[in-house]
Amino acid sequence: MTALHNGLENDRKDDALPALALKDKVALVVGVANEHSIATGCAQAFRLAGADVALTYATEKAKPFVMPVADAIGAALLLPMDVDVEGEMEAVFAAIAKRWGRLDILVHSIAYCPAGDLHGRVTDCSRAGFAQAMDISVHSLIRMARLAEPLMVQGGSILTMTYYGGEKVIDHYNIMGPVKAALEGTMRSLAVELGPKRIRVNAISPGPLNTRAGSGIAHFDELIDAARLRAPEQTLVTIEDVGHMAVMLSSDNARCVSGDTAYVDGGFHVRA
Protein backbone atom coordinates (compact mmCIF):
# COMPACT_ATOMS: atom_id res chain seq x y z
CA MET A 1 0.00 0.00 0.00
CA THR A 2 1.44 3.39 -0.97
CA ALA A 3 2.33 6.24 1.35
CA LEU A 4 -0.41 8.40 -0.17
CA HIS A 5 -3.04 5.76 0.54
CA ASN A 6 -1.66 5.09 4.03
CA GLY A 7 -1.72 8.80 4.77
CA LEU A 8 -5.27 9.06 3.51
CA GLU A 9 -6.40 6.23 5.74
CA ASN A 10 -4.69 7.71 8.78
CA ASP A 11 -5.98 11.22 8.17
CA ARG A 12 -9.57 10.21 7.57
CA LYS A 13 -10.07 7.21 9.85
CA ASP A 14 -11.94 9.20 12.49
CA ASP A 15 -14.15 11.05 10.02
CA ALA A 16 -17.79 10.30 9.35
CA LEU A 17 -17.18 8.35 6.15
CA PRO A 18 -19.45 5.29 6.40
CA ALA A 19 -17.32 2.16 6.56
CA LEU A 20 -17.78 0.10 3.40
CA ALA A 21 -20.88 2.08 2.40
CA LEU A 22 -20.08 1.23 -1.23
CA LYS A 23 -18.95 -2.38 -0.75
CA ASP A 24 -19.19 -4.41 -3.97
CA LYS A 25 -20.10 -1.35 -6.06
CA VAL A 26 -18.28 -0.38 -9.26
CA ALA A 27 -17.42 3.28 -9.84
CA LEU A 28 -16.10 5.11 -12.88
CA VAL A 29 -14.47 8.46 -12.08
CA VAL A 30 -13.80 10.76 -15.03
CA GLY A 31 -11.80 13.94 -14.55
CA VAL A 32 -8.73 13.12 -12.47
CA ALA A 33 -5.95 15.46 -13.61
CA ASN A 34 -3.59 15.00 -10.66
CA GLU A 35 -3.66 14.21 -6.94
CA HIS A 36 -5.28 17.58 -6.15
CA SER A 37 -8.31 17.13 -8.43
CA ILE A 38 -11.87 17.07 -7.11
CA ALA A 39 -12.26 13.78 -8.96
CA THR A 40 -9.30 12.41 -6.99
CA GLY A 41 -11.11 13.18 -3.74
CA CYS A 42 -14.09 11.19 -5.02
CA ALA A 43 -11.98 8.25 -6.18
CA GLN A 44 -10.11 8.05 -2.86
CA ALA A 45 -13.34 8.18 -0.87
CA PHE A 46 -14.99 5.52 -3.04
CA ARG A 47 -12.10 3.12 -2.46
CA LEU A 48 -12.14 3.71 1.30
CA ALA A 49 -15.88 3.01 1.22
CA GLY A 50 -15.29 -0.35 -0.47
CA ALA A 51 -15.95 0.32 -4.17
CA ASP A 52 -13.94 -0.94 -7.12
CA VAL A 53 -12.81 2.12 -9.09
CA ALA A 54 -11.96 2.74 -12.73
CA LEU A 55 -10.18 5.98 -13.67
CA THR A 56 -9.57 7.75 -16.96
CA TYR A 57 -6.93 10.15 -18.24
CA ALA A 58 -7.49 12.70 -20.97
CA THR A 59 -4.22 12.41 -22.95
CA GLU A 60 -0.90 10.57 -22.90
CA LYS A 61 0.64 13.80 -21.63
CA ALA A 62 -1.76 13.74 -18.66
CA LYS A 63 -1.30 10.04 -17.89
CA PRO A 64 1.86 10.41 -15.71
CA PHE A 65 -0.07 12.75 -13.41
CA VAL A 66 -3.06 10.41 -13.11
CA MET A 67 -1.15 7.15 -12.74
CA PRO A 68 0.11 7.91 -9.19
CA VAL A 69 -3.51 8.44 -8.10
CA ALA A 70 -4.54 5.16 -9.72
CA ASP A 71 -1.66 3.32 -8.04
CA ALA A 72 -2.34 4.92 -4.66
CA ILE A 73 -5.96 3.86 -4.51
CA GLY A 74 -5.51 0.54 -6.27
CA ALA A 75 -7.69 1.47 -9.25
CA ALA A 76 -8.81 -1.62 -11.13
CA LEU A 77 -8.68 0.12 -14.52
CA LEU A 78 -6.90 3.19 -15.88
CA LEU A 79 -8.10 4.00 -19.37
CA PRO A 80 -7.72 6.83 -21.91
CA MET A 81 -10.77 9.03 -22.45
CA ASP A 82 -10.58 12.25 -24.39
CA VAL A 83 -14.22 13.19 -24.98
CA ASP A 84 -13.14 14.89 -28.22
CA VAL A 85 -11.71 11.64 -29.63
CA GLU A 86 -14.26 9.48 -31.41
CA GLY A 87 -14.66 6.08 -29.82
CA GLU A 88 -12.62 6.55 -26.64
CA MET A 89 -15.63 7.06 -24.39
CA GLU A 90 -17.34 4.00 -25.84
CA ALA A 91 -14.17 1.95 -25.31
CA VAL A 92 -14.09 2.85 -21.61
CA PHE A 93 -17.65 1.70 -21.02
CA ALA A 94 -17.00 -1.45 -23.06
CA ALA A 95 -13.99 -2.24 -20.84
CA ILE A 96 -16.13 -1.81 -17.71
CA ALA A 97 -18.81 -4.07 -19.17
CA LYS A 98 -16.19 -6.71 -19.97
CA ARG A 99 -14.62 -6.63 -16.50
CA TRP A 100 -17.67 -6.28 -14.27
CA GLY A 101 -20.75 -6.54 -16.45
CA ARG A 102 -22.25 -3.53 -14.70
CA LEU A 103 -21.63 -0.01 -13.38
CA ASP A 104 -23.04 1.43 -10.16
CA ILE A 105 -21.51 4.91 -9.93
CA LEU A 106 -20.39 7.46 -12.50
CA VAL A 107 -18.61 10.70 -11.63
CA HIS A 108 -18.44 13.33 -14.38
CA SER A 109 -15.90 15.96 -13.32
CA ILE A 110 -14.73 17.61 -16.52
CA ALA A 111 -15.11 21.10 -17.91
CA TYR A 112 -13.27 23.16 -20.50
CA CYS A 113 -13.42 26.50 -22.26
CA PRO A 114 -10.78 28.07 -24.53
CA ALA A 115 -8.77 30.61 -22.56
CA GLY A 116 -9.69 33.54 -24.78
CA ASP A 117 -13.38 32.99 -24.12
CA LEU A 118 -12.94 31.98 -20.48
CA HIS A 119 -11.17 35.23 -19.61
CA GLY A 120 -13.46 37.53 -21.58
CA ARG A 121 -16.97 38.85 -21.14
CA VAL A 122 -19.94 36.61 -21.80
CA THR A 123 -21.00 39.26 -24.31
CA ASP A 124 -17.83 38.67 -26.30
CA CYS A 125 -17.74 34.87 -26.17
CA SER A 126 -17.10 33.38 -29.59
CA ARG A 127 -19.51 30.95 -31.19
CA ALA A 128 -16.81 28.30 -31.47
CA GLY A 129 -15.67 28.78 -27.87
CA PHE A 130 -19.21 28.55 -26.51
CA ALA A 131 -19.92 25.43 -28.57
CA GLN A 132 -16.74 23.73 -27.37
CA ALA A 133 -17.37 24.64 -23.73
CA MET A 134 -20.91 23.27 -23.91
CA ASP A 135 -19.85 20.11 -25.73
CA ILE A 136 -17.04 19.15 -23.34
CA SER A 137 -18.59 20.42 -20.11
CA VAL A 138 -22.26 19.50 -20.66
CA HIS A 139 -22.97 17.26 -23.62
CA SER A 140 -20.27 14.84 -22.45
CA LEU A 141 -22.47 14.17 -19.39
CA ILE A 142 -25.35 13.24 -21.69
CA ARG A 143 -23.12 10.92 -23.69
CA MET A 144 -21.77 9.23 -20.56
CA ALA A 145 -25.25 8.83 -19.08
CA ARG A 146 -26.43 7.19 -22.28
CA LEU A 147 -23.55 4.68 -22.13
CA ALA A 148 -23.95 4.12 -18.39
CA GLU A 149 -27.69 3.46 -18.56
CA PRO A 150 -27.54 -0.14 -19.87
CA LEU A 151 -24.78 -1.00 -17.38
CA MET A 152 -26.69 0.28 -14.35
CA VAL A 153 -28.76 -2.87 -14.26
CA GLN A 154 -29.64 -2.51 -10.58
CA GLY A 155 -29.95 1.25 -10.60
CA GLY A 156 -27.09 3.59 -9.91
CA SER A 157 -25.76 7.05 -9.14
CA ILE A 158 -24.49 9.64 -11.62
CA LEU A 159 -22.74 12.69 -10.21
CA THR A 160 -21.51 15.83 -11.95
CA MET A 161 -19.58 18.81 -10.59
CA THR A 162 -21.00 22.31 -10.75
CA TYR A 163 -20.29 25.65 -9.04
CA TYR A 164 -22.33 28.45 -7.49
CA GLY A 165 -21.49 30.56 -10.56
CA GLY A 166 -24.10 28.56 -12.42
CA GLU A 167 -26.79 29.96 -10.13
CA LYS A 168 -25.57 33.52 -9.48
CA VAL A 169 -23.19 35.75 -11.39
CA ILE A 170 -19.73 35.42 -9.87
CA ASP A 171 -17.09 37.96 -10.89
CA HIS A 172 -14.51 36.55 -13.31
CA TYR A 173 -16.31 33.20 -13.74
CA ASN A 174 -17.56 34.56 -17.06
CA ILE A 175 -18.91 32.10 -19.65
CA MET A 176 -18.56 29.14 -17.30
CA GLY A 177 -21.54 30.53 -15.37
CA PRO A 178 -23.99 29.90 -18.25
CA VAL A 179 -22.24 26.61 -18.98
CA LYS A 180 -22.72 25.38 -15.40
CA ALA A 181 -26.34 26.56 -15.48
CA ALA A 182 -26.85 24.37 -18.54
CA LEU A 183 -25.12 21.49 -16.77
CA GLU A 184 -27.46 21.76 -13.79
CA GLY A 185 -30.51 21.85 -16.06
CA THR A 186 -29.21 18.79 -17.90
CA MET A 187 -28.68 16.99 -14.59
CA ARG A 188 -32.32 17.56 -13.62
CA SER A 189 -33.62 16.31 -16.98
CA LEU A 190 -31.46 13.18 -16.76
CA ALA A 191 -32.73 12.55 -13.23
CA VAL A 192 -36.32 12.57 -14.50
CA GLU A 193 -35.64 10.40 -17.53
CA LEU A 194 -33.48 7.81 -15.77
CA GLY A 195 -35.41 7.74 -12.52
CA PRO A 196 -37.74 4.89 -13.57
CA LYS A 197 -34.62 2.69 -13.86
CA ARG A 198 -33.57 3.70 -10.32
CA ILE A 199 -30.66 5.70 -11.71
CA ARG A 200 -30.22 8.83 -9.63
CA VAL A 201 -28.52 11.93 -11.06
CA ASN A 202 -27.22 14.71 -8.81
CA ALA A 203 -24.73 17.57 -8.88
CA ILE A 204 -22.17 18.50 -6.26
CA SER A 205 -21.33 22.19 -5.93
CA PRO A 206 -18.03 22.65 -4.09
CA GLY A 207 -16.69 26.00 -3.01
CA PRO A 208 -13.50 27.20 -4.73
CA LEU A 209 -10.61 24.76 -4.35
CA ASN A 210 -6.96 25.09 -5.29
CA THR A 211 -7.09 22.76 -8.30
CA ARG A 212 -5.48 23.01 -11.72
CA ALA A 213 -8.89 23.67 -13.28
CA GLY A 214 -9.63 26.45 -10.82
CA SER A 215 -6.30 28.14 -11.36
CA GLY A 216 -7.26 28.75 -14.99
CA ILE A 217 -9.93 31.26 -13.90
CA ALA A 218 -8.81 34.90 -13.84
CA HIS A 219 -8.49 36.40 -10.34
CA PHE A 220 -8.98 32.95 -8.83
CA ASP A 221 -7.21 34.00 -5.64
CA GLU A 222 -9.97 36.56 -5.13
CA LEU A 223 -12.61 33.84 -5.37
CA ILE A 224 -10.70 31.80 -2.80
CA ASP A 225 -10.41 34.75 -0.41
CA ALA A 226 -14.09 35.65 -0.81
CA ALA A 227 -15.15 32.08 -0.10
CA ARG A 228 -13.02 31.95 3.03
CA LEU A 229 -14.29 35.27 4.36
CA ARG A 230 -17.97 34.96 3.46
CA ALA A 231 -18.67 31.31 4.20
CA PRO A 232 -20.36 30.91 7.60
CA GLU A 233 -17.74 28.31 8.56
CA GLN A 234 -14.98 30.70 7.38
CA THR A 235 -12.95 27.88 5.97
CA LEU A 236 -12.22 26.35 2.58
CA VAL A 237 -13.45 22.93 1.59
CA THR A 238 -11.10 20.15 0.54
CA ILE A 239 -11.26 17.42 -2.07
CA GLU A 240 -11.81 15.00 0.82
CA ASP A 241 -14.93 16.94 1.81
CA VAL A 242 -16.26 16.58 -1.72
CA GLY A 243 -15.39 12.89 -1.69
CA HIS A 244 -17.41 12.38 1.48
CA MET A 245 -20.45 13.96 -0.18
CA ALA A 246 -19.94 11.81 -3.28
CA VAL A 247 -19.96 8.66 -1.13
CA MET A 248 -23.09 9.74 0.66
CA LEU A 249 -24.97 10.51 -2.57
CA SER A 250 -23.82 7.26 -4.15
CA SER A 251 -24.74 5.02 -1.23
CA ASP A 252 -28.02 3.21 -0.84
CA ASN A 253 -28.78 5.53 2.07
CA ALA A 254 -29.45 8.28 -0.50
CA ARG A 255 -31.67 6.13 -2.72
CA CYS A 256 -34.44 8.76 -2.72
CA VAL A 257 -32.16 11.71 -3.51
CA SER A 258 -32.12 12.68 -7.18
CA GLY A 259 -32.17 15.82 -9.30
CA ASP A 260 -30.53 17.76 -6.48
CA THR A 261 -27.53 20.07 -6.16
CA ALA A 262 -25.56 19.36 -2.99
CA TYR A 263 -23.47 22.29 -1.81
CA VAL A 264 -20.09 21.59 -0.21
CA ASP A 265 -18.99 25.17 0.40
CA GLY A 266 -19.11 25.83 4.15
CA GLY A 267 -22.45 27.56 3.67
CA PHE A 268 -21.13 30.20 1.23
CA HIS A 269 -24.19 29.87 -1.04
CA VAL A 270 -26.61 31.05 1.67
CA ARG A 271 -25.00 34.49 1.92
CA ALA A 272 -26.67 37.36 0.05
Image (cartoon, grey):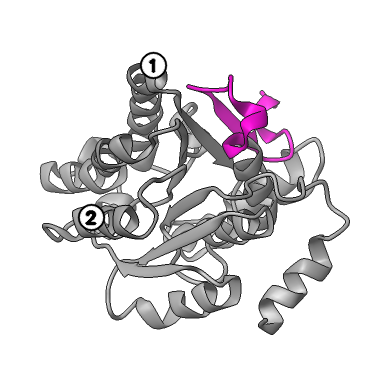
Using the image, determine if residue 156 lies above or below residue 211: above
Give the side of residue 168 with respect to residue 272, left or right: left
The amino acid pointed to by label 1 is Pro
| Mark 1 and mark 2: Cα distance apart in space | 25 Å
Name the element at disc 2: helix
Q: Residue at x 63, y 51 (%)?
A: 243
Q: Is residue 38 visible?
A: no
Q: Position of residue 155 (x, y in %)?
A: 45, 30
Q: Indicate the amino acid at tag 2.
A: Met
Q: Is residue 182 left or right of residue 40?
A: left
**Above-or-below relation of 185 to 146:** above
Instruction: Write down the region rendered in magenta.
Output: 249-272
Residue topped by disc 1: 196
Front-lying residue, 4 or 232: 4
Q: Nearer the viewer, mark 1 or mark 2?
A: 1
Tell me where residue 128 appears, x and y as whole percent.
12, 47
* Disc 2 crowd, CA 10 A, few/some/many (<14, 14-19, 20+): many
What residue is drawn where x is 36% and y is 78%?
A: 63
**In the rendered view, does 130 fall on the left or right side of 37?**
left
Query: Can you give x and y, in whole percent of width and height, for residue 207 in the image?
Result: 61, 44
Looking at the figure, which quarter contains the C terminus?
A: top right
Query: Would residue 148 be counted in the magenta stretch?
Result: no
Quarter location, residue 45: bottom right
Residue on which disc 2 sits: 89
Q: Earlier in the sequence, mark 1 or mark 2?
A: 2
Picture coordinates of residue 24 (x, y %)? 57, 50
Mark yes or no: residue 265 visible: yes
Residue 271 is one of the magenta-drawn residues: yes
Q: Residues within 10 Å of mark 1 (few under 14, many from 20)?
A: few
**Quadrant where the image shows the N terminus:** bottom right
User: Looking at the rendered structure, which numbered label has been put on residue 25?
Assistant: none
Residue drawn at point x = 80 percent, y = 60 percent: 12
